[in-house]
């Protein structure tokens, strides 16, 4: 029954112009991921909660979280307040970042580490969720959905191959290296 309702909801969502987004989790197959704030388009293992409650997360027992900063911060607040336990978290956190906020400062990565005990990788998305670029598991730059997207973001293409082994070009934010140590 729940499955049927879900299927109907998805079908009506599509008919109504609802947009589903690929998570692009850095591991494949992905662990059990709770994707907060966006409707996910698979793959298996990724559970999306465009709107979510502590109860949703309590029931899913996610092994990883993905979401906008505000959603991740709210989940952390609930955990710190003792209102939510997430005992299965162990895989990288994915944080969605708007173009004007990328790359996320190191202190934000540190904060996410304190909250969830796992490294965080960034995905640059438009406010509507459209993916433009994603940090791969090597965490040494971004892969872009297209060269146009990368250029739109002001990213600079690296001449070297990505340490992750992907044949896709690596793009870097020039401000990231220049600002290193500047706080
Ligand atoms: Zn890579």
Image: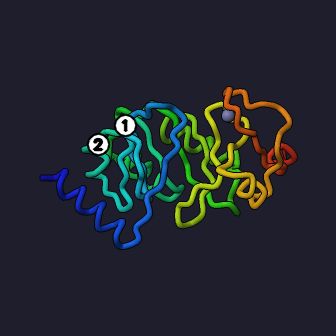
Circle count: 2
Determine the residue positioned at 73% across, 31% down. 162
Is residue 129 rendered to the left or right of residue 122? left
Q: Is residue 104 above or below residue 121?
A: below
Residue drawn at 34 percent across, 58 percent down = 52
Question: Measuring 34% from the left and 33% from the top, which residue is drawn there?
Answer: 87
The answer to which image quadrant residue 171 occupies is top right
Mark 1 Cβ and ligand 1 under 8 Å apart: no
Is residue 13 shown left or right of residue 167? left
- 182 on left or right of 51: right
* Extreme residue toward the bottom, this view: 16
Question: Mark 2, mark 1: which one is toward the viewer?
Answer: 1
Q: Residue under circle 1?
A: 32
Element type at mark 1: loop
Mark 2 → mark 1, Cα distance in angstroms: 8 Å
Protein image colouring: rainbow
Residue 124 in the image: state x and y as whole percent: 63, 54
* Crowdedness near tag 1: few (<14), some (14–19) or many (≥20) residues, C-alpha within 10 Å: some
Q: Position of residue 103 (x, y in %)?
A: 71, 51
Q: Looking at the image, which is closer to me, 31 or 57?
A: 31
Q: Residue furthest left?
A: 1
Query: Under tag 2, what secondary structure?
Result: helix
Locate ligand 1 by image quadrant. Answer: top right
Counting from the top left corner in percent of width and height, residue 115 is at: 49, 42
Q: Nearer the viewer, residue 132 or 95?
A: 132
Residue for point 78% across, 45% down: 172
* Crowding near the residue tagged with mark 2, few <14, some 14–19, many ≥20 C-alpha atoms within 10 Å: some
Image vertical order of residue 90 relative to residue 157, above or below: above
The response on whether ligand 1 sits within 8 Å of label 2 is: no
Circles 2 and 1, Cβ within 8 Å, touching? The answer is yes
Location of mark 2 (residue): 60
Upstream in sequence: badge 2 or badge 1:
1
């Amino acid at each position: 029954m729940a499955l049927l309702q879900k299927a109907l909801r998805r079908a009506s969502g599509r008919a109504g112009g609802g947009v589903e987004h690929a998570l692009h989790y850095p591991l494949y197959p992905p662990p059990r991921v709770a994707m907060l704030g966006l409707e996910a388009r698979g793959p298996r293992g990724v559970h999306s909660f465009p709107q979510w409650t502590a109860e949703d997360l309590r029931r899913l027992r996610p092994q990883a979280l993905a979401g906008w900063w505000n959603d991740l911060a709210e989940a952390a607040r609930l955990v710190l307040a003792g209102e939510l336990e997430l005992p299965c978290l162990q895989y990288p956190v994915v944080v969605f970042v708007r173009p004007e906020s990328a790359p996320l400062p190191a202190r934000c990565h540190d904060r996410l580490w304190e909250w969830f005990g796992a490294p965080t990788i960034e995905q640059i998305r438009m406010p509507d969720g459209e993916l433009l670029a994603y940090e791969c598991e090597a965490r040494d730059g971004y892969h872009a959905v297209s060269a146009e997207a990368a250029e739109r973001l002001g990213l600079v293409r690296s001449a070297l191959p990505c340490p992750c082994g992907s044949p896709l070009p690596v793009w870097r934010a020039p401000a990231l290296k220049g600002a290193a140590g500047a706080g």
